[in-house]
Amino acid sequence: MKRKELVQLAATVLQRLDAILPPLAQEPDWTAIAYRWHRLGNKGVLESLPHPHTFDLNCLAAVDEQRKQLVRNTEQFLAGRSANNVLMTGARGTGKSSLVKALLHQYASKGLRLVEVDKNDLLTLPALLNILKQRPEKFILFCDDLSFEDGDEAYKALKTTLDGGLSQRCDNVLVYATSNRRHLMPEYMADNMAQTSQGGEVHPQEAVEEKVSLSDRFGLWLSFYPFDQNAYLQAVENWLAEAGLQLDDAARRAALNWSQSRGSRSGRVAWQFVCDWAGRKPEERTL
């Protein structure tokens, strides 16, 4: 084989290796306010997000009590006082993840940073904590739509991070998680029949305790409930104001028709309607 062919072959091999090997470890961009953690082997990479999706807390409707508690907990955290990890559960589309995103808009200037962590990347949380504990900023690890199946190992890593590991909890890190499940793991009728020893389980009640032990490690639980029509219309009005529009009669009728076509009323449906309404031409905003 000629020398030129060998060089070309070597270059091809290097390109293929570069596509499958993890990137070289680099210092994250600490000027960013939001990040995403990616698992790579036993460690990971902290990727900065230059344009995170954030908005004002006042855009959210029908979550006043939940917002009050979450803001209070976050302000305690930023002030260096004790604060709790938070689990937000309940109806879909009612503002659980939106509240966390809005916190970043409200408190980024006071040192708050948001790190998005997918369930599949939880096994490398210790590596992430080793990076964050050396920083002066305050970090919220955001686990959105969190749930686990039986036999899933990732929940054990999260349990240790929340409470129960030998190492001391990081003073500048909290976990805010959202889920449709209060206990984060599937529950079965057999779980409520502890005396029957379903499936050959010798101590079935201990299996139940294992399932609820993760959610118990969150100090603050916030519940979210389905929207009625008034709450839905308030959410529409808030998002319309953010877009520079008003909830006039035409918008109100269109919003109600939109929710009926979706078979649902929620903050998410309200936001989706406003995306459509604000994108229409002025002459199309009449019914």
Image: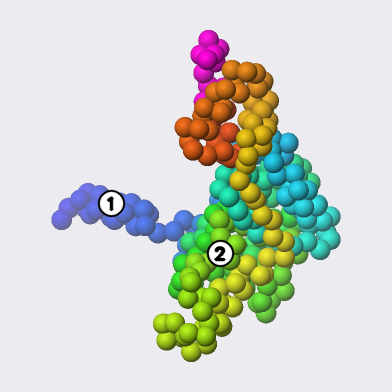
Disc 1: which residue: 12
* Residue closer to the observer: 5 or 58: 58
| Three-letter amino acid code of the residue under disc 1 | Thr
In the picture shown, does residue 176 fall above or below 269? below
Disc 2 secondary structure class: loop
Q: Residues within 10 Å of mark 2 (few under 14, many from 20)?
A: many
Answer whether residue 283 is magenta in the image.
Answer: yes
- Residue 130 in view, yes or no: no
Location of residue 52 by image quarter? top right
In the picture shown, does residue 139 fall above or below 287? below
Read off the magenta span.
275-287
Answer whether residue 58 is magenta in the image.
Answer: no
Of the numbered discs 1 and 2, the one sitting upstream in the chain is 1
The mark found on residue 62 in the picture is none
Location of residue 105 by image quarter? top right
- Residue pictured at 69% horizontal, 56% vertical: 222
**Residue 121, percent from left and from top:** 51, 61
| Three-letter amino acid code of the residue under disc 2 | Leu
Disc 2: which residue: 184
**Residue 257, percent from left and from top:** 52, 27
